[in-house]
Amino acid sequence: MVNENQHTCSASSSSKSDGGSSSGSESSKDSSRCSTPVLDAERHERLREKMRRRQDSGDKWFSLEFFPPRTASGAVNLTSRFDRMGAGGPLFIDVTWHPAGDPGSDKETSSMIIASTAVNYCGLETILHMTCCNQTKDEITGHLQKAKRLGLKNIMALRGDPAGEEWQEEVEGFNYAVDLVKHIRNEFDDYFDICVAGYPKGHPEAENYEADLRHLKEKVLAGADFIITQLFFRFFFLKFMKDCQAIGITCPIVPGIFPIQGYHSLRQLVRLSKLEVPQEIKDVIEPIKDNDAAIRNYGVELAVSMCRELLDSGMVHGLHFYTLNREVATTEVLKRLGMWTEDPRRPLPWAVSAHPKRRVEDVRPIFWASRPKSYIYRTQEWDDFPNGRWGNSSSPAFGELKDYYLFYLKSKSPREELLKMWGEELTSEESVFEVFTCYITGELNKNGHRVTCMPWNDDPLATETNLLKEQLEKVNRRGILTINSQPNINGKPSTDPIVGWGPSGGYVFQKAYLEFFTSSEIVTALLKVLKKYETRVNYHIVNVKGQNITNAPDLQPNAVTWGIFPGREIIQPTVVDPVSFLFWKDEAFALWIEQWAKLYEEESPSRMIIQYIHDNYYLVNLVDNDFPLENCLWQVVDDTFELLN
Amino acid sequence: MVNENQHTCSASSSSKSDGGSSSGSESSKDSSRCSTPVLDAERHERLREKMRRRQDSGDKWFSLEFFPPRTASGAVNLTSRFDRMGAGGPLFIDVTWHPAGDPGSDKETSSMIIASTAVNYCGLETILHMTCCNQTKDEITGHLQKAKRLGLKNIMALRGDPAGEEWQEEVEGFNYAVDLVKHIRNEFDDYFDICVAGYPKGHPEAENYEADLRHLKEKVLAGADFIITQLFFRFFFLKFMKDCQAIGITCPIVPGIFPIQGYHSLRQLVRLSKLEVPQEIKDVIEPIKDNDAAIRNYGVELAVSMCRELLDSGMVHGLHFYTLNREVATTEVLKRLGMWTEDPRRPLPWAVSAHPKRRVEDVRPIFWASRPKSYIYRTQEWDDFPNGRWGNSSSPAFGELKDYYLFYLKSKSPREELLKMWGEELTSEESVFEVFTCYITGELNKNGHRVTCMPWNDDPLATETNLLKEQLEKVNRRGILTINSQPNINGKPSTDPIVGWGPSGGYVFQKAYLEFFTSSEIVTALLKVLKKYETRVNYHIVNVKGQNITNAPDLQPNAVTWGIFPGREIIQPTVVDPVSFLFWKDEAFALWIEQWAKLYEEESPSRMIIQYIHDNYYLVNLVDNDFPLENCLWQVVDDTFELLN
């Protein structure tokens, strides 16, 4: 397989994010048609602009703070927590900096890699914390360069806790957060949005409250864009905010909210933050300290009423939540406040990445529909992303997927669970058909387990796919092992809860698509049948060795999802691209082995069955080009079976 | 609204034709997402490839030879002849080189400029003749560089006629066509396709027939891609072809066909070409030498039977016609042979240009729909053309249209005719309304003349616009002076004779569009009405001073024509682009003065009425985004008049 790792195009985007705004007059490059802000203004704004826009429109927002996990499996869990909590619509998340945990390293548990995962793979606007004490200038610059390279655009500049017993100012080093703010602005100009911490009760080490306010103002003057406060238990916040304004701090100040979630976590946090818990709270908690649920309920209650008061003051536009990496309490508070966006409108049919270089990306091959993180991973080295059109990708330069166990690609289910779903013991190809069928129908398998994921899709069936459930069940039973499909759609409103995406007032369209593994006997019959559908159905049929049969004209991509919106150009977010398909087929075939066969002992019959399928089956995709007519792909399959009988 | 019927003949990639075929590995430019061959393979092929493809598919073709005109008005006429004869589907046209007429100059009658017009403005694959004798190497290189710059890709390499009485070989200069062929290949590598002349009866100055064949072979060996023969009267051609093959000439040989069109033109041609007219032809012609029509009928008859014999031989794949810049005879022959493509499928809704740098162009603002040549002129300096998406053209850099009288932009109708159509004397704004109304209805005006063109559209109403005729008539009568419009289309077959375009098997769509001039009173009412349609209708309203009112989001373009095709990406060839609209409005307002007001004396009442409209009216465009519903723009206009009453 060709595997070129440099993918370039003439587009202009990267130069802009370097802050070098090119002057309008020499426009031959400026007028380049390749880099276009399209659907979603928010996708192109910096965090501080988003904040300002929300403030101007009166649209309240929230953000979520996480800390890096201790273990690799913790990283897998945190990534799916990002996905779940990202669905609630936070304006951003932030990831704390743990000096003890090698925070700038490439370890999957480092602050840097967790923040990068949030940006790149979960599509979340993310702030990376960074502390400066006990570090050299070069170390810090190195961290910042790496953060920039990974697509991070926001830094929370902190002093950090001194390493020794008593903190000593270093003459040459960074002693305060303000030094870090200045350093970022000196070295990276306006590239990063910078956040700093505010202390509604004053920093525990500050001389006094007024001195601490002056320090805060210095940080803002040095270039900070907004302030997030330390958590607090009483309504110090509004006084703090007024005091800030009084001394001329005009940037946004976001209150840090800490929903009490348990006795021990509260004690620990209090110890770290050197805050005192008010007596009235202690009075409630002490008697119920062994009842986690009761404490959490109380914590939610308390947080909701505090947030309501803050929002009602008219001075607060956003709320920052200290989640402690937990979902329930924060989600509950947000739902009760009406700020949790239950079903956020999808800007595109697939999960976007928040890396700045991908901000114009609006076309992807449909093959990775259920594996968006793998797609992002395999295209991470591209300098340029398809925008408006996929193009004739004669060398799409997909990175090889060598490691199927990267934490953000790994299945959420452990081996034992997978075995229960996919069979402790396989006896025939038909027993594999049954696994596929159970996944489609949602019925229990022979051993009474539900099949909620497959090697090609770590999540249960999409709502959209449910539209095809009956037909999918029928064909899977007969050995058409489907791994991707979509119904044809002839102009449904873009607000349609199942197939809609993009801004409201538009219309979305789809060509029917079906992708499956099947035996060579079925392929032989299928090819005969497809002759009848020659111009109507485009097909690509390939086996693991790369033997490839297609009727696609000139290796051109076929747009299979598109949308028409008021006052916009056409958006066509998914295509069937013949060239990318050959890269996808390597991954799709490898998943049989990597995720399924390897569950079994070598030489075991179960493993040999999967290996046989891997070696002998074909991967097929079909597109029905006549989207206004009834989907003919089921007829194609019926005709095929008829021919076989 | 013009239904431009240009056939696509076009271009090949300039990088390829520069000979620097980039090796597959450094593919950063090759894999660019921005430059994608899309709809029409032919648009990207070189002439010799097109010829080969036609030969392989057995699809017979024809080509047309023209000479440069003597006068500027001749150039205007020849340009519209290119448009009309281009509609018949020639594989290419060629333009002869007139050494006496300063053929490489910028004069509108030069061979160079006429060939460039054919390529750039008429979208025709074009061969420029070039002779070499009596010219220095530098002069010739200069001509070739200029030709390349202007988008010409094919040269017919000829010796030309010596200047003196007796021809003398020049030791240092170019003595034969073969020297020119070698020079082109030396200096321009493989950039140009090169054609050379063959003489079925031997060149008149050659020692003998065999020597002439050897010279021809030398020209081919030096790098010529194909041969066009001198005209001939008897069936020398097939013998000539066999003789060529016998000595190893394998490139295409195209017979030159000369339909006799008149007694004098025949005599002149015979004198120049030193050919003898066979006695049996003389016998027919001499008795009818004063009856042009009779001679032409005979000439057509003769040409048809000769062409049939050539095509039936199976050795001939294309026919080259010496048109003498006349239409009737050649068109008649081609129609009788069934080779005239009556209604060639439009590859895009607008007339493409054949300049190689425009070969990927597939999006244009709708404003120039009736003035494609002006659009091409104003964008001729662009290095990069929109492909797939118009993009956010914050600086589209349109060239200024300073000269409204460029021969390829000029009205085909002389001043007197325009006065008859648009009124010798205007008495009020209403008399202007009437001109617009008569243009729409096709009815005679007060003075009994039909209005077949307007300053914004030099052709009668397009068939598509006829779909809106009734409503257009109604609104023009009341002072909504429409200059561009299209109906909404919700998925008609791409083969639809009126609104179809692109390959077959697709579906085309349109948003309803209406563009008009109107008074400020009407605009005031219109704006009130538009509030009711806020998200559904996008509008841009501007006066000559540039006061601009719009509800378009973020200056984004609105796609108003698009097509979905089997196995292709979405094509969206026309957009309403807010930024380009401000460039178009300068042109649209200026046409009132340049083409209409200036027909009248200064200070005359007629001129002052047009000047008043120019100074006070607004140019308005409206798009109904809800293309699946009934067009609401007529309701918008009705509501406006209702509000006024």
Image: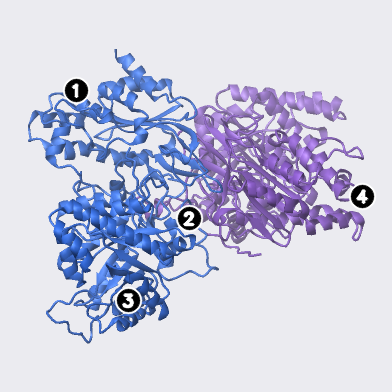
Chain colours: A purple, B blue
**Disc 1 marks which amino acid?**
Glu
Q: Chain of mark 1?
A: B
Q: Residues within 10 Å of mark 4 (few under 14, many from 20)?
A: some
Q: Chain of mark 3?
A: B
Q: For this view, does A475 lie left or right of residue B325?
A: right
The CA distance from mark 2 to mark 4 is 51 Å
* Residue A171 visible in this rendered orientation of the protein: no
Q: Pointer 3: what residue?
A: B181
| Residue at x 87% of width, y 58% of height | A608
Q: Pointer 2: what residue?
A: B37
Q: Pointer 4: what residue?
A: A425
Quick check: do tags 2 and 1 share a chain?
A: yes
Check contact, mark 2 vs mark 4: CB within 8 A.
Answer: no
Q: Residues within 10 Å of mark 2 (few under 14, many from 20)?
A: many
The disc placed on residue B430 is 1
Q: Nearer the viewer, mark 4 or mark 1?
A: 1
